[in-house]
Image: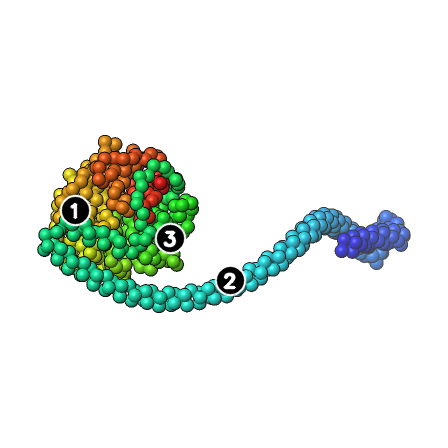
Amino acid sequence: MSMNMLTEEEVSIQAIKHALKALRKRHLAEEGAHAPAIAAISRPLIYQGSEWKEKAEKLELELQQCYKAQSRLSDQLVVEVAEGRAAKASIQEKETAVASLEKEVAQLSDECSELKKLLDEKTKGFELLTSENQELKRQLEETSMKAKNAEAENKMLVDRWMLQKMQDAERINEANALYEDMVEQLKSSSLQQVALQQVDGVVRQSEEGAEFFVESSIPTTCKNRIHAHDGGCASILFEYNSNKLVTGGQDRSIKMWDTSTGALTRTLYGSLGSVLDLTITHDNKTIIAASSSNNLYVWDVSSGRIRHTLTGHTDKVCAVDVSKISNRHVISAAYDRTIKVWDLQKGYCTNTIIFPSNCNSVCFGTDGRTICSGHVDGNIRLWDIETGKLVSEVAAHSLAVTSISLSRNGNTILTSGRDNVHNLFDMRTLEVYGTLRGSGNRMASNWSRSCISADDGYVAAGSADGSVHIWSIQKGDIVSTLKEHGSSVLCCAWSGLGKPLATSDKNGVICTWV
């Protein structure tokens, strides 16, 4: 393009030069041709004819016109030369811009190639993820189908189990009725004390799991020290006729431990609040937890899943217990000043008892019809589970009752209070027959739990200084002081096998003692 433009410019210049040369030649030729005329003109006008005069004027006019044409062509040549230079500069700038654009195009082409390669890799990865997702969806569908089948089978088994337990409960009720008739007959024969001792022995021997029972020994040594829960552990208990420990803590979890090794065997999740109290059915298949979320949670131990969430309380639930003769009935106490009776087979509340003072602890009597509760006003109260009426009431402590425990034979109620006193009541008369104190024993909270040993011979209670005191019920004195905890001890539980003793504290540490 630039070569063509330069050629046209040179052609124009050559044409102009050629035109100027032609004009000069014509001018010279005309001067030669007109020379005689000019000489004649220079002569006196008297010698010239009019014809030559006109010719001279005409030629002079043509000469002027040639000069004017030459001037215009010169001006035009200057303009065209300037335009040619400007066009040449513009062409150079455009050539520079074209080179820059060609370089940029090359860079963009390289980037495009890299992006295309990256896109191909991403496409392959997406196709792989899509195939994996489809496989996972297929596996999920298969698992969901298996879960539905298992749930249906589990429901059928639960229904069969509940039916069997109802039949067992009916047989137990018949046995209790027979037992009461025997007691009445013995009372009428004026052999009340001897009869009570004999019946107590018969009941102890006939209890389920009696073959596992051994005499309790005084614990002296810490066998296991386990950090079980973050934020503290307020409730622990042993499975029936087992050394497996169940614990609940501020971290909202339920954990199960093998105390012979200190190993964690299972963790149950699902509670929406801190676990404040625990209970377990006599077949060790169901765990019920009282929670600060105002609910109770019922777990099936074998599957680890929540079977029921019992709702109805309007404040934190601080105590729970299951019937001694039926795994079906559960009682709970909350800071809404109510005790509720629950039917686990139906999954809802069957009765609500209202009282004027908040309850910190509850337990079932051995007859399955009596509820014993300990209150903030220091009183313990007995209630009829069917009617919800108050059966008896007694002032047990000068400050709040923190714990109520029932002895294995069902004849003794152990109460602990914020007045740092532990009282032993006769369940039949609600009379105090023993009071246990210790100079260093101070209850750490409103829910500090004490316990009675499996042979009903000892009482264990934790203290705010981290120590655990053991009393002999027969002697009424402290026989052992256990020190291992670094914070306030909240709960004590004794295995039904006679040992070990387990204790928990505000730091979530659990110790087992033998």
| Label 2 crowd bin: few (<14), some (14–19), many (20+), radius 10 Å | few
Tag 3 near tag 1, CB within 8 Å: no
Earlier along the polypeptide chain: callout 2 or callout 1? 2
Residue 339 horizontal side relative to residue 114, left or right: left
Distance of label 3 from label 1 (alpha carbons): 37 Å
- Pointer 1: residues within 10 angstroms few (<14), some, or many (20+)? some
Q: Is residue 404 above or below residue 469?
A: below
Residue under pointer 1: 426
Question: Circle 2 is placed at which residue position?
Answer: 136
Instruction: Please name the amino acid that badge 2 sits on.
Output: Leu
Q: Is residue 136 left or right of residue 208?
A: right
Point 87% across, 49% down: residue: 43
Classed neighbour count for the residue bearing mark 3: other residues with Cα under 10 Å, few (<14), some (14–19), many (≥20): some
Q: Are marks 2 and 1 in contact (CB under 8 Å)?
A: no
Work out how far the residue at label 2 is from the one at label 1, CA to CA, in angstroms. 63 Å
Q: Is label 3 in contact with label 2 (beta carbons under 8 Å)?
A: no
Which quarter of the figure has residue 377? top left
Q: Nearer the viewer, residue 83 or 472?
A: 472
Q: Secondary structure at mark 3?
A: strand
User: Which quadrant: the N terminus?
Assistant: bottom right
**Residue 283 position within the rendered picture, expressed as x and y whole percent measured from the top left:** 32, 57
**Distance between mark 3 and mark 2 Cα atoms:** 26 Å
Q: Quadrant of the C terminus?
A: top left
* Frontmost residue, 276 versus 240: 240
Residue placed under numbered mark 3 in the picture: 268
Q: How many marks?
A: 3
Q: Amino acid at mark 1?
A: Asp
- Residue at 46 percent across and 64 percent down: it is 143
The mark lying in front, picked from 3 and 2, is: 3
The percent position of residue 448, horizontal first and vertical second, equals: 26, 42
Q: The residue tagged with tag 1: helix, strand or loop?
A: strand
User: Residue type at mark 3?
Assistant: Leu
